[in-house]
Image (spheres, rainbow, N blue to C red):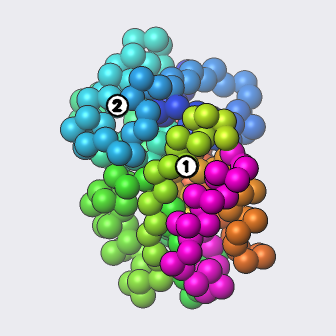
Amino acid sequence: MRIAFFDSGIGGLSVLEEALSRRPEVEFLYYADTDHVPYGQKSRAALIDYAGSAVSFLLAAGADAVVVACNTATAAAIDFLREQFAAPIFGMEPAVKPALAETAGRRVLVLATPLTLREQKLHHLLDAVDPAHCADLLPLPGLVAFAERREFDGPAVQDYLQQALAPFTLANYGAVVLGCTHFNYFKDSLAALLPAGIQFVDGCRGTINHVFHTL
């Protein structure tokens, strides 16, 4: 079994890391579409084109299944990919449901790219799991650029996050959903600005659970 992962850059490596830690004997492939990073500020049509090309490449390279290790590409293109290709295609989505379950009625802040927050896939999820409207959405497109420069902390990152978080009363939040795989690299930077005890929730473990259970 050969399982492939793709993302616009290094973000999806956080998903691959989860898979490697669980099943080191499995053969994995990874494709970073750095020609088109960042995905989060592209159009839906462009994402469908990029994702289709990535999956075609990976299947031609011998992949038996593909994990779209990117919330943005999943939101824009997962339906197209599953219609277009016979191989199993797995996607990501912001882990809003487990975050709400773990916070006992406190608010949840969902961090993602503009495209992920704009697509209907997320809003259908929120309609299903958040009837009390406890989740707030915050786009952080700049974090992708920081991640691709391997700049995970420092004054520029802290200033960017501080300005983005300023409108929110952070004491009201019990969890932060990292709805972009690039954002997993900024947990320490975020923790320095958030109240003690706030939980970080991402979709890596849930996605890999689903992949291995299915395959």
User: Is the residue 118 above or below the residue 103 in the image?
Assistant: above
Mark on residue 29?
none
Q: Position of residue 75 (x, y in %)?
A: 35, 50
On the picture, is 70 further left or further right than 202?
Answer: left
Judge whether residue 95 can be spotted in this image: no
> Which residue: 52% across, 31% down?
9
Amino acid under label 1? Leu
Q: Quadrant of the N terminus?
A: top right
Using a 10 Å C-alpha cutoff, classify the residue at mark 1 as few (fewer than 14 neighbours), some (14 to 19) or many (20 or more): many
Secondary structure beneath dot 2 equals helix
Marked residue nearer the N-terminal end (1 or 2): 2
Amino acid under label 2? Ala
Judge whether residue 110 can be spotted in this image: yes
Residue where numbered disc 1 is placed: 143
On the picture, is 131 further left or further right than 146?
Answer: left
Q: On the image, which quarter does residue 133 sit in?
A: bottom left
- State yes or no: residue 161 in magenta: yes
> Which residue: 37% across, 60% down?
117
Secondary structure beneath dot 1 equals helix
Magenta residues, start to end: 152-176
Front residue of this view, candidates 189 and 100: 189
Residue where numbered disc 2 is placed: 51
Distance in Å between CA atoms under marks 1 and 2: 21 Å
